Image: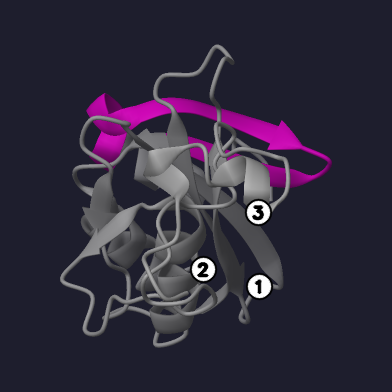
Amino acid sequence: MKTTDPVVARFRERFDPEIIGIEEVRGQVAISVKSPRIVEMLRSLNSDAECPFDVLTDLTAVDYLRLDHPERFAVVYQLYSLLRNERLRVKAYVSEARCEIESAHALWGDANWLEREVYDLYGIRFINHPDLRRILMPDGYAGHPLRKDYPLKGRGERSNFPKYALEEGE
């Protein structure tokens, strides 16, 4: 897929104010967007008649702490079109102050577990998720281990940081 592809052109026409950038990296188009209309944007890609991105192959997040990006976090959706054998990456930026984004669970069922993983490890809340709770870390665990400001040393050193200390009895 190229940045000049008709699917990308239709997306650009419809969501131009929300688009931060469109680039091609190693033959794959990556679209960076603002997050408030993310479900509407993903739905348009999922239901595109010419090239439906009907498979969510992965969903993750990136912490851009201390890097020059529009916001601290980005939720990254890796999409795939079975019809055209095309891949597309969508990065939706999420602010640290309002660390939440709409859930894509209604579009792709596998978003359920992937969003739970991102919530657990990065602390990004997914609005309207049917069962948003920790999936990898213990329920009482404080903190999110994939954030760049998470202490890197062992359990004893982390206990000096109240924000990341385990609850009593863990």
Residue 126 circle label: none
Q: Which residue is drawn at 42% across and 69% down?
A: 115
Q: Are marks 1 and 2 in contact (CB under 8 Å)?
A: yes
Q: Is mark 2 on a helix, strand or loop?
A: loop
Which circle, 3 or 1, is nearer the viewer?
3
Q: Residue at x 27, y 38 (%)?
A: 15
Give how far apart the Cα atoms at labels 2 and 3 are.
48 Å
Residue behind mark 2: 51
Q: Magenta residues, as a range?
A: 14-32
Residue kind at label 3, given as amino acid type: Arg
Question: As drawn, is 94 to the left or to the right of 135?
Answer: left
SS at mark 1?
loop
**Label 3: few (<14), some or many (≥20) within 10 Å?**
few
The residue that disc 3 covers is 155
**What's the residue type where badge 2 is placed?**
Cys
* Few, some or many residues within 10 Å of mark 1 (<14, 14–19, 20+): few
Q: Disc 3 versus disc 1: distance between alpha carbons?
A: 48 Å
Ranked by sequence position, the earlier of labels 1 and 2 is 2
At label 2, counting other C-alpha atoms closer than 10 Å, the crowd grade (few under 14, some 14-19, many 20 or more) is some
- Residue 106 against residue 91 in the figure, above or below: below
